[in-house]
Image (cartoon, rainbow, N blue to C red):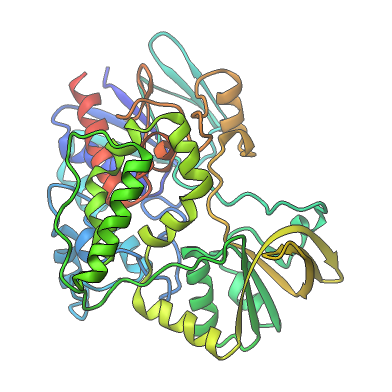
Amino acid sequence: MIPAIAIIGGGISGTLTVLQCLKQCRKPLSVLWFDSQNKFCKGLAYSTLDENHLLNVRANNMSVFPDAPDHFVNWLANYDPQYSPNDFVPRKIYGLYVQDTFQNFQKTNTLVTVQKIAQEVVSIQQTETNFNIISDQTYQAQKLILALGNFLPGHPRSISKTFINSGNYFQNAFDPSLIEQALGENDITIIGSGLTMIDAVVSLAKHKYAGIIRVISPHGYVPQAHTEQPLPSIAPFLEANKTYTLPELVSLVKFQLKRAKQEQLNPHSVIDAMRPFLQNIWLNFSLEEKQQFLRHLRHKWGVARHRAPVQSIQLFNELKLSHRLILLKGRISDIRSAGEGFEIYYTDSKNQVEKFKTSLLINCTGPEADYNRLASPLIQQMLKDGIIVSDMLKYGLDAQKDGQIRQNLFTLGPALKGILWESVAVPEIRVQAREIVSKIICD
């Protein structure tokens, strides 16, 4: 019997895993690949048709293969020579690259059969030898990989809940119908001020939205821009096998940032120099240190770590200077439906309750990471049956650092954020996919 692997999730985590199966396997293998949205290879992130939605990482670091760093750059040179390795390419184009790579590798390895199944998996049962994967019918596989990617954000906390059912509330900032609907409004509010907010603002501006945009978040932090002509980088300052406490790391980073300023070095390089060590640092933090980081430093870290293309930040700042965009710092307490629009009540930095009216709401608060809060029947069934468990921080799933949840069951990508912290971007997920598939094939 040909062994079978089931992969649930058609986005980048699932696709990188399938690609590694095609790349590594030298014996017959059946891959059952499930995606309820039928967005294989692209997922939510790369299915956008909007040319204004750009990658937040330069092309030269977006290869799907960790051992072939120029793979995307070479593909891009053939697809459209106008792009350089340092460009921030439209996500639409990156989706085409991922899809094209899958199709090419599928042709070159005929030992691996990939069956795309565009059905919602509603239940999983584990026996001594198999997983029974139940959708419209029952499939069996010996190994199972949960490549679930990012979920939509949770609804904003609010006393009133009626806004959730409004046609003018968008839980998905990349909903294809959003722009057309937004262009008919004069006042839009975006909840959350991270990278997804930048995408939404740029898209609105490029489509000639002429009204007011309000952006509200508890801290009012906005992503920084990638540096186009960066200053010299700071020298490496972390030791690979050393265990750092949170206070030690904070002190060290402050020192390096101060040094970078004094010596006219690129301050972004301080954060970039940490990236290869972040997973190991996080693994060695105590639970209390991780909780302290999430309470006090998470938002500042997000601003420093996750940067946007300079042209996107320039546009954001232009809108702000022209008073077409208003950035508010406040915690929302209530969102009340008011006709076709909303009344938003929030507490400002002076602890005063303020309110304003808006016509349309876009939720950019970031993906829901607490699996206990997800409405997915499959997730809730697996939690109930003990097949999966949330990690202690409720930032994903409890698993070993290599993604193994239990025997023959694995996960990767955003599901490992609570375990590894740095686990949501292509450079990390492509390594995880390679290692998981290598482990499965060698078992």
Screen quadrant of the N terminus = top left
Question: Do we see residue 36 in this rendering?
Answer: no
Q: Is residue 144 above or below residue 35?
A: above
Question: Do we see residue 354 in this rendering?
Answer: yes
* Relative side of 443 to 343, left or right: left
Q: Nearer the viewer, residue 221 or 401?
A: 221
Kindly indicate the quadrant of the structure image that contains residue 343. Answer: bottom right
Residue at image position (23%, 54%) is 101
Give the x, y percent position of residue 357: 79, 74
* Relative side of 96 to 44, left or right: left
Give the x, y percent position of residue 439: 22, 25
Q: Nearer the viewer, residue 160 or 119?
A: 160
Kindly indicate the quadrant of the structure image that contains residue 235. Answer: bottom left
Please count the marks in the image: 0
* Relative side of 127 to 247, left or right: right
Q: Which of 398 and 71 is in front in this view?
A: 398
Q: Farthest residue to the top: give it.
A: 128
Give the x, y percent position of residue 221: 51, 65
Give the x, y percent position of residue 361: 68, 67
Residue at image position (53%, 76%) is 201
Q: Nearer the viewer, residue 375 or 311?
A: 311
Residue at image position (39%, 33%) is 419
Residue at image position (75%, 55%) is 164
